[in-house]
Amino acid sequence: MNDIKEIVLYYKDENVTYKELDVAKELQDRYPELGKPILIREGNNTNKTAIIFDNLKEFKIEINHINVSFLIDHTYFDKINSLIFDCIDIFDSQHVAFKRIGYLSNINISDSLKDILENKYLNVDNIKGVPYLNVFNEIEVKGYKVNIWERIDFEHKIIKYDFNTNQNEEVKFDMKFIKEFTSSSNSFMDGRLS
């Protein structure tokens, strides 16, 4: 995958329980293209099972008892809000809530954009020629702080954006928040790359 996005949903409770087979079946019903899941025990001394859908290169899901993560390429970018909402809805039916969200985006950059970014960020003598740069920012979405790490790898011509709601705040997830979160994140990236 070239340009990819990953969404990570973090559970509200540390000792989360849900019916793995019911969650897997509901995901299959909503997204039949995922195919059959792989169910794997999460560790030697646990009866918890991870659910992995990895039949498609453009859409993968991993569910464990720490978080839910899905990885998508450009063919699913326009469905990102629905994917998040469906996932929250499926777990809500299992009486499982989420408290945080992370949104990661890897973007390959052209040589010309690499040059523009180097001139923009590395225009100080003591950091000229560094192979990568980490830049921290914050935005606010619907009253919640969102931390942003922008990791620019000049050598490999890739930018990694990492948007995360604050660890100490519990987000109230609804469709308005999800849309605003992804829209604000995408707008931030677009603004940085233009």
Image: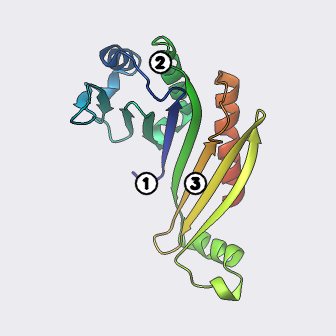
| Residue 25, x across and y down, in percent | 33, 15
Numbered mark located on residue 161 in the image: 3
In the picture of the structure, the residue carrying the numbered disc 1 is 2
Kindly identify the residue that appears in the image at 50 percent across and 45 percent down: 5
Point out residue 167 in the picture as x, y percentages from the top left corner: 62, 41
Q: Residues within 10 Å of mark 1 (few under 14, many from 20)?
A: few
Cβ–Cβ under 8 Å for marks 2 and 3? no
Q: Quadrant of residue 151?
A: bottom right
List the single residue furthest toward the left.
44
| Residue 194 visible here | no
Q: Residue furthest top?
A: 93
Three-letter amino acid code at the position of disc 3: Tyr
Mark 2 and mark 3 lie on one chain; the one further toward the N terminus is 2
Marks 3 and 1: CB-CB under 8 Å?
no
As drawn, 94 above or below 192? above
Left or right of residue 166, residue 88 in this image: left
Which secondary structure lies at badge 3?
strand
Q: Is residue 17 left or right of residue 49?
A: right
CA neighbours of label 2 inside 10 A, class few (<14), some (14 to 19), many (20+): some
Q: Which mark is residue 192?
A: none
* Disc 2, SS: helix
Examine the rendering and report whether any part of residue 88 can be seen: yes
Q: Secondary structure at mark 1?
A: loop
> How many callouts does the rendering have?
3
The answer to whether mark 1 and mark 2 are in CB contact below 8 A is no
State which mark lies toward you, 1 or 2: 2
The amino acid at mark 2 is: Phe
Query: Please, which residue is most extreme toward the front here?
Result: 45
Query: Label 3 vs label 1: CA separation?
Result: 14 Å
Residue named by callout 2: 91
Q: Residue at horizontal 64%, vertical 24%?
A: 173
